[in-house]
């Protein structure tokens, strides 16, 4: 009886500790969050900024001093308000007289977008998030904690924008911008669940990282 107890006792203790560890890791404290993350919004808006920065200065110069209406009739995309607002800022800061109605305009600029979104990919060496094992008693799935020896997450945003400008009355063509392409990335690497590295070309994300360190 004594030997049986010695063999059984460590096993029971080990299973109890595993159950306790698993239960503790599954519970998470979450605050109310918007549908889109901060990182996603900054990546997309940065890619929009960079696509518009590709617009040729000579093309903008053809609009300088004229009343221009920006038409978004053919623009149906993510963050289109930010795109149009950024384009207005670009024109106004370069001497273009942006007006709010087509009837007031001497020239019209139509803006369209072929892509304005985010791609994400994750690779995990170990137990990935959202994996589960069946409970041996009830058969119900039991969530496993994420235990990763190495984890990589890549987020990459791309914006494809194009403009066409023409005379408001005669419809005479002034210029076509062609494809204006901009992008931004944010990469995360995690080793042994403790060492975390982040590489990004979004200035605001780097600034936020410094703010997080300040208010920890």
Image: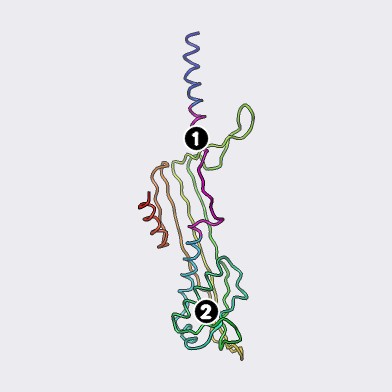
Viewer-closest of 4 and 35: 35
Query: Which image quarter: residue 133?
Result: top right
Query: Which image quarter: residue 176?
Result: bottom right
Viewer-closest of 164 and 36: 36
The answer to whether mark 1 and mark 2 are in CB contact below 8 A is no
Q: Residue at x 46, y 85 (%)?
A: 61
Q: Residue at x 55, y 55 (%)?
A: 34
Regarding mark 2 in the picture, which secondary structure is present there?
A: loop
Which badge, 1 or 2, is on the more N-terminal residue?
A: 1
The residue carrying mark 2 is 177
Q: How is the image coloured?
A: rainbow
Q: Residue at x 55, y 63 (%)?
A: 117
Q: Please provide percent x and percent y for residue 131.
A: 56, 40
Q: Which mark is residue 110?
A: none
Packing grade of label 2 (10 A; few <14, some 14-19, many >=20) is some
Q: Please provide percent x and percent y for residue 135.
A: 60, 30
Q: Residue at x 48, y 40 (%)?
A: 126
**Nearer the viewer's eye, disc 1 or disc 2?**
1
Packing grade of label 1 (10 A; few <14, some 14-19, many >=20) is few
Q: Please provide percent x and percent y for residue 17.
A: 48, 27
Segment colored magenta: 17-40
Q: Residue furthest top?
A: 1
- Asked if residue 61 is among those painted magenta in the image, a careful observer would answer no
The residue carrying mark 1 is 24
């Amino acid at each position: 009886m004594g030997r049986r107890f010695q063999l059984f006792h460590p096993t029971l203790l080990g299973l109890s500790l595993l159950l306790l560890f698993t239960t503790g890791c599954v519970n998470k404290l979450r605050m109310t969050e918007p549908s889109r993350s901060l990182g996603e919004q900054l990546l997309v808006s940065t890619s929009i900024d960079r696509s518009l920065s590709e617009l040729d200065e000579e093309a903008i110069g053809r609009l300088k001093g004229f009343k221009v209406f920006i038409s978004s009739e053919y623009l149906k995309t993510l963050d289109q308000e930010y795109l149009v607002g950024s384009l207005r800022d670009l024109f106004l800061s370069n001497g273009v007289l942006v007006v709010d109605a087509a009837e007031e305009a001497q020239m019209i600029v139509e803006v369209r977008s072929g892509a304005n979104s985010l791609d994400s990919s994750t690779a995990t060496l170990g137990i990935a998030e959202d994996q589960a094992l069946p409970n041996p008693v009830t058969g119900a799935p039991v969530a496993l904690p994420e235990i990763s020896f190495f984890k990589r997450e890549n987020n990459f945003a791309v914006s494809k924008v194009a403009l066409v400008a023409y005379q408001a009355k005669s419809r005479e063509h002034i210029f076509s911008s062609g494809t204006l392409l901009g992008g931004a990335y944010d990469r995360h690497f995690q080793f042994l669940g403790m060492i975390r590295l982040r590489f990004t070309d979004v200035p605001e994300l780097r600034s936020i990282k410094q703010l997080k360190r300040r208010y920890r």
